[in-house]
Image (tube, rainbow, N blue to C red):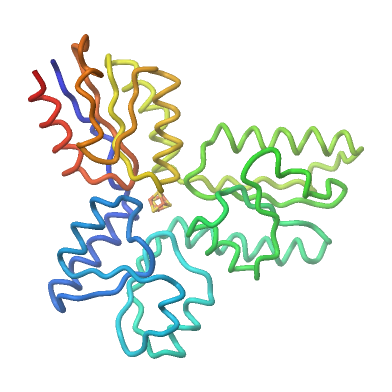
Amino acid sequence: MNVVIDKYSGFCFGVVYAIEMAEQELKKSNSLYCLGDIVHNNKEVERLNDLGLKIISHEELKNYTDCTVLIRAHGEPPETYKIAMQNNIQLLDASCPVVLKLQHQIKEGYKTVSDIDGQIVIYGKKGHAEVVGLLGQIGGDAVLVSSIDDLDQLDFSRPIFMYSQTTKSPKAYADIKLEIENRRRENGIKDPLQFVVNDTLCRQVSGREPQLKKFSAQHDVIVFVSGTKSSNGKMLYDSCKVENPNSHFISDIDEIKKEWFSSANSVGICGATSTPLWLMENVSEFISEIK
Ligand code: SF4
């Protein structure tokens, strides 16, 4: 049985940057706090925990003083920086530049929208760290849309400026855009300048989708390795599954079932932007030894 790891899967540059920053600090001090899971992958979080990284929640942050806290790639709302300043906390800021750019775009868009009685719409997952950070830029004054069902909250007669969480599916974002266009038309609103759709998807994720589809079609069985909390993991796995029904989602080796490979000649292993290469290599080794 031929077992191949997808060469494009694994950490994106935003995650690499955050993990390198944590590792460098841990070499110096053996202990570091990180606000929320540094990456949506339990196995990688466990590895970093062993090096001295301690994950703390936003609630806990309020009780910490005079220490160093890492901000992960997802970014944070302004409130977090305020608490750090009040509590004399030094921040190691590993917010991804792609997310920072989106935060800035939303702030700028909000100024325009406020002048014309419009609405900011953010397509993203409720409660996701990046989305919390985005909403925080404008005091939460946006409509959060997680699916087409949420569009009823919008006032289609008013201007709409739309943004997407960086890791969402391009197809799903396009579907939301199309539905808003239809409803605006139904409401007799035709001015295209009043519906601005910003392309804010991260190319590190959207660029992987077509490539992963090709990879999925080339193998009899696909094993997709990802943490269950990873948004892009879910989205990319769904794309693999559409292309190859013999695709399986796992977070760790003990979830692998031997019967998946009973008639397979080739197995493809791939993962999310938060999946460490070492984990995919362990999975590959395990599958290669299945008799
Ligand atoms: S997926 Fe994109 S936006 Fe998110 S951390 Fe990676 S590079 Fe940054």
Q: Is residue 37 toward the left or the right of residue 102 in the image?
A: left
Q: Is residue 56 above or below residue 275?
A: below
Quick one: quadrant of the N terminus? top left
- Front position in the image: 111 or 27: 27
The residue shown at (75%, 38%) is: 180
The residue shown at (29%, 37%) is: 225
Count of marks, rendered view: 0
Q: Is residue 136 toward the left or the right of residue 256 in the image?
A: right
The residue shown at (50%, 83%) is: 82
Q: Is residue 28 toward the left or the right of residue 125 in the image?
A: left
Q: Is residue 57 toward the left or the right of residue 263 in the image?
A: right
Residue 158: percent from left, percent from top: 84, 52
- Front position in the image: 237 or 110: 237
Residue that extends furthest to the top in the rendered view of this protein: 263
Q: Is residue 231 above or below residue 107?
A: above
Residue that extends furthest to the right in the rendered view of this protein: 188
Residue 222: percent from left, percent from top: 29, 23
Quick one: quadrant of the C terminus? top left
- Front position in the image: 115 or 173: 173
The residue shown at (23%, 25%) is: 257
The part of the image, by quadrant, that contains residue 280 is top left
The part of the image, by quadrant, that contains residue 176 is top right
Residue 172: percent from left, percent from top: 58, 34
